[in-house]
Amino acid sequence: MSFAIIRNSNYKKDNLAGLYKHNERKNTNYSNKNIDRSKFNLNYSLKKCNTTYYNAFKNLQNQYDLKGRIISTTNIFCEYVITSDKEFFEKIGKDETLRYFKTAYKFVANYQNLGEEFIVSAKVHMDEACPHMHIVFVPVVHKLDTKSGKQISKIACSEYWKGKDSYKRLQDNFHSYMTKSGFNLERGLNGNTHIETDKLKQLTNYEVQKYEMKSINLEQEKEIIDTEELKEEYKRIIKKFNTLAKQYTKIKSLTDTTTQKYQEMQIEYHNIKTENIKLKQENKGLKNYIQKSIEWVSVVLNWSFERVNKLINDYIERNEENERDYKCRTHRR
């Protein structure tokens, strides 16, 4: 008996370029020896992506006002690889294979109330040993915002895959949906384990069952270990956060004080600069006035300009000297 196989992977922004090139067959060279370039024309899309996956993501984010804080570590895409075994597809033929993938596409669009609009690409690969479909989508959850009381759409991979049994529920629902649609398939053994893509393409029937059986206990142990590690990591992060918060408070206080002083100095500098420009203009005017006055006196007295200028300078020097002597006498008293 053949199996209804669905496997999920999550992707961050930095992983999208490679995913896009592989799924949409944009690479010039392929390390995967199973890919037959001569069969590229047999591949087809149930939903075509006419731009890069990241551009498609940004377009959806803007178009539907998707909420959610996006940082470098955020999983912004999920990808299902949907398939069965080679014998199954050979048995049902070309038309039923197309219906199989169309049915699976419809399942994904409605599962978890996702919405077809958030599926970015659905590419069926017929150029490898076993037909399979890559469905790439943004993990959007639709919920009521507690603050505004309005319905919002939010990018939240962790909420989309909420609960330890989330993958098990996916497999259960997928198997039920496909069998009700007329495909005679079995559901694999229970468990949260997903097979890596390369292994998924190699394993079939009994091998799949065997692989999942071996993985169940390991998965359960891993979850316990991860929980303990998560608790320790959480404590470490909280401690580090508190230390950084104290340092931030001190630095912010110092920065605010420095910024305020800098702004005050900027204002003072601007005022001094304005006053200096004003004084230069006044000084220039006074020099002009004195120059004209000396010229006028020299004409009236019929003296040379240099003689009048010397008399004035001598007078100023004597006054300054007398002023200094007066200050010295006053200081001695």
Image (cartoon, grey):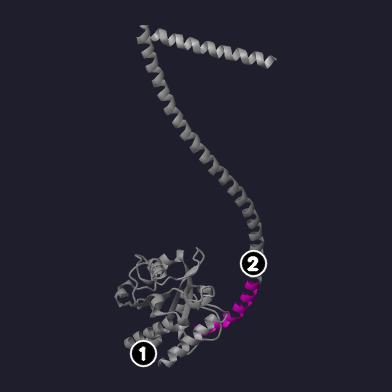
Q: Is residue 297 among the parts visible in the rendering?
A: yes
Q: Which residues are magenta?
A: 206-227
Asked whether the residues under the numbered discs 2 and 1 touch, taking CB atoms below 8 Å apart as contact, a structural biologist would say no
Magenta stretch mostly in which secondary structure? helix
Q: Residue at x 62, y 14 (%)?
A: 326
Q: Can the viewer see residue 83 in this picture? A: no
Q: Which mark is residue 42?
A: none
Question: In the depicted view, which residue is nearer to us: 107 or 207?
Answer: 107
Q: Secondary structure at mark 2?
A: helix
- Across and down, in percent, residue 129 comes to 38, 78
Q: Quadrant of residue 24?
A: bottom left
**Of the residues tagged 2 and 1, which is closer to the observer?**
2
Answer left or right for 33 relative to 238: left
For marks 2 and 1, give the CA distance: 51 Å
Residue 11 is a magenta residue: no
From this view, report whether residue 292 is shown above or below residue 56: above
Residue 234 - label: 2
Q: Please state, as top left, top right, bottom left or bottom right, where the C terminus lies in the image.
A: top right
- The residue labelled by disc 1 is 92
Neighbour tally class for label 2: few under 14, some 14-19, many 20 plus, Cα within 10 Å: few
Q: Amino acid at mark 2?
A: Tyr
Q: Position of residue 271 (x, y in %)?
A: 49, 37
In the image, 283 versus 261, the foreground residue is: 283
- At label 1, which amino acid type do we have? Ile
Q: Position of residue 201 (x, y in %)?
A: 44, 78
Q: Name the residue furthest right.
A: 333
Decide which of 144, 195 is in the foreground and name it: 144
Q: Residue 127, located in which quarter of the rendered image?
A: bottom left
Residue occupying image coordinates x 55% and y 80%: 192
Find the residue positioned furthest to the front.
Answer: 300
Relative depth, front residue between 241 and 173: 241
